[in-house]
Image (tube, grey):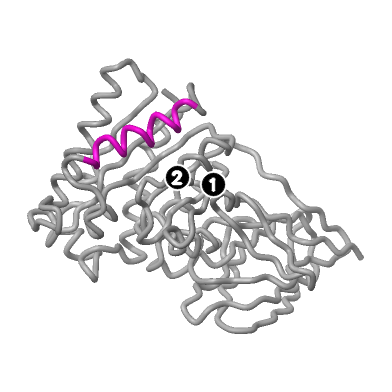
């Protein structure tokens, strides 16, 4: 029998305690500025998009961990099909006998995309078990809760995971619920991470928190994009403006801007940089990702898509992102 521990993909760093408990960082932890970035650090420690894979003819999967009260579940896939969805709230330990597998089957474990989580053990023990390294283009996607996808039923139903699996891409999900504010640490993390495609969906958190005004939003976005471009001079970079949120389209926030204003400003900055010669910079109008009727039907709280809404987002964004990669 061969016991193989999970080899995680999709994070910036992993921490291991003296007792062997593992936790994760999706942003470079040296870039935080406490106490100002404490909320950002909390979101970046969540395991959105983090996964491990093995090849096996069968065996015993042991999964032991502890999740917060709002923790999303795990998803286990065998040869691309979900076979188990396992709750991660509180202390938990699962021992799964994987029997009847075809030779050299692909076993994939996706960690909960939302909620605080520590992993004490994630191992596969069997007669023929090997850890699998990923192949394919490397895709980094940065955004708000609409990229973090808290409302998705499970980690393989977020729109970034759906797009990555559909295209065979290696995903780094930098969706940060409520914390997509063009922070230097996010730009620096993207700069340090190898990539073949980068996308950003920006504007909605800045509207909701009224972080940037008419004077400051455009320059902040310009600076963020230029920092990413300096580190990745030839990588296709796709900027997605905010998806529709009907009550916010014409409602001014505390700095006097509507969501439509942030969408227009985002597009204006991208077009300015394109006019300056950035031919690998692409723009996707977020207002076309979901129709007004879909925004009514698939955003139960008027802001966040449900699982079906995230599937629609994946269907609409996947071809646009693939076209940018192949351009």
Q: Residue 278 at x, y = what percent?
A: 35, 20
Q: Seen from this angle, which residue lies furthest right?
A: 1
Give the quadrant of residue 198.
Answer: top left
Residue at the image point whose x is 64% and y is 84% from the top: 91
Tell me whether circle 2 and circle 1 mark residues in contact (CB < 8 Å): yes
Say which residue label 2 marks: 141
Give coordinates of residue 25: x percent, y percent: 59, 56
Say whether disc 2 or disc 1 marks the residue closer to the N-terminus.
Answer: 2
Reading the image, the residue beneath label 1 is 171
Q: Which mark is residue 136?
A: none
Give the secondary structure at mark 1.
strand
Whether residue 301 is in magenta: the answer is no
Q: Main secondary structure of the magenta part?
A: helix
| Mark 2 Cα-neighbour bin, 10 Å: few <14, some 14–19, many ≥20 | many
Magenta segment range? 216-230
Q: Quadrant of the C terminus?
A: top left
- Quadrant in the picture for residue 40: bottom left
**In the rendered view, does 239 fall on the left or right side of 90?**
left
**Which residue corresponds to the image point at 30% horizontal and 62% vertical from the top-left?**
305
């Amino acid at each position: 029998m061969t016991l193989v521990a999970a080899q995680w993909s999709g994070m910036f760093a992993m921490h291991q305690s003296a007792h062997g408990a593992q936790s994760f960082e999706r942003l470079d932890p040296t870039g935080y500025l406490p106490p100002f970035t404490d909320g950002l650090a909390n979101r970046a420690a969540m395991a959105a998009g983090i996964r491990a894979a093995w090849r096996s003819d069968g065996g015993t999967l042991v999964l032991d961990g502890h999740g917060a009260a709002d923790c999303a579940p795990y998803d286990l896939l065998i040869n691309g099909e979900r076979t188990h969805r396992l709750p991660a709230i509180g202390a938990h330990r699962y021992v799964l006998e994987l029997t009847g597998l075809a030779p050299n089957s692909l076993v994939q474990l996706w960690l909960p995309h939302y909620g605080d989580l520590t992993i004490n053990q994630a191992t596969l023990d069997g007669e023929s078990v090997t850890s699998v390294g990923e192949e394919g283009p490397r895709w980094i996607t940065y955004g708000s809760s609409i990229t973090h996808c808290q409302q998705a039923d499970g980690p393989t139903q977020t729109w970034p995971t759906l797009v990555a699996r559909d295209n065979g891409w290696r995903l780094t999900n930098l969706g940060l619920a409520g914390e997509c504010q063009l922070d230097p640490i996010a730009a620096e993390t993207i700069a340090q991470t190898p990539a073949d495609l980068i996308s950003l969906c920006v504007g909605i958190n800045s509207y909701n928190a009224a972080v940037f005004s008419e004077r400051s939003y455009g320059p902040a976005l310009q600076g963020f994009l230029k920092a990413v471009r300096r580190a990745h001079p030839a990588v296709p970079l796709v900027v997605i403006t905010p998806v529709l949120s009907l009550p916010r389209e014409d409602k001014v926030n505390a700095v006097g801007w509507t969501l439509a204003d942030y969408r227009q400003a985002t597009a204006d900055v991208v077009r300015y940089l394109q006019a300056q010669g950035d031919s690998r910079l692409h723009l996707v109008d977020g207002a076309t990702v979901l129709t007004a009727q879909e925004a009514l039907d698939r955003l139960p709280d008027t802001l966040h898509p449900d699982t079906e809404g995230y599937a629609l987002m994946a269907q609409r964004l996947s071809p646009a992102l693939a076209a940018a990669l192949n351009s």
